[in-house]
Amino acid sequence: MTDARRGDVSPGSQTVATWARYVGALALLGVGVDHLAQFFVDSYSVVPVIGTLFVMNFGSAAAIAAGLAAPVQRLPGRTGGVALPVLTVAGIGVAAGSLAGLMISESSGLFGFMETGYRPAIMLSIGLEATVVALLGVSLAAGLRAHDWRVARAHT
């Protein structure tokens, strides 16, 4: 139940945040795997700079997705309180950065590389990146609201 005067939200916000985080982490891993597949299958490995960025996309997406799936909020001290929001923002950054890189490479070129057309792998990447931004955005917002709710309840 929501108390509009105090801005409280129900503990259901934590459930929404958790589910959005896990599904967002899975979609983020999909972004990385899609880039790694393009690196090997679509020969992006021979494109200077872009090939390296595709491998780095996979590495960062996999590491952040693993962190989002792990119980990092149980880390000791303040680390546990900030790890999840930091990982969530980092996941949004990887997905949004990948999408921005694609848009730049299609319109004006990126590091001398120009992407053309919308192959299935590109469509999949766009869909996954948009999903990551949306789900991790929901997770971040709902998680922060649930945290505020717990803090407000502790002080009453």
Image: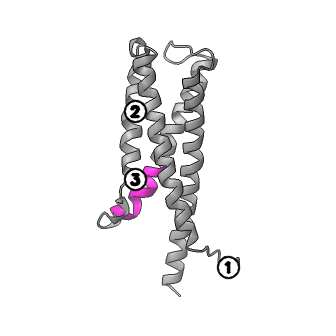
Mark 1: amino acid: Asp
Q: Tell me the residue at 39%/16% (across/down).
A: 45
Q: Earlier in the sequence, mark 3 or mark 1?
A: 1
Q: Position of residue 100 (x, y in %)?
A: 57, 31
What is the distance, in whole Å, between disc 2 and disc 3 at their CAs?
A: 16 Å
Local crowd at mark 3 within 10 Å, few (<14), some, or many (≥20)?
A: some
What is the distance, in whole Å, between disc 2 and disc 1 at their CAs?
A: 43 Å
Q: Position of residue 149 (x, y in %)?
A: 55, 75
Mark 3: amino acid: Ala
* Colour basis: one colour
| Looking at the image, residue 48 lies above or below residue 99 | above
Q: Which image quarter holds the N terminus?
A: bottom right
Label ID, residue 3 = 1
Q: In the rendered image, which residue does mark 2 sit on?
A: 58
Q: Position of residue 2 (x, y in %)?
A: 67, 76
Q: Bounds of the magenta span? A: 79-88
Task: Specify whether residue 68 is painted magenta.
Answer: no
Q: Earlier in the sequence, mark 2 or mark 1?
A: 1
From the image, state whether disc 3 or disc 1 is nearer to you.
3
Task: Specify whether residue 80 is painted magenta.
Answer: yes
Report which quarter residue 121 is drawn in: top right
Label ID, residue 69 = 3
Local crowd at mark 2 within 10 Å, few (<14), some, or many (≥20)?
A: many
Of the pair 150 and 34, the residue shown nearer to us: 34
Mark 2: amino acid: Phe
Q: Earlier in the sequence, mark 2 or mark 3?
A: 2
Furthest residue in direction bottom, as rendered: 156
Q: Are marks 2 and 1 in contact (CB under 8 Å)?
A: no
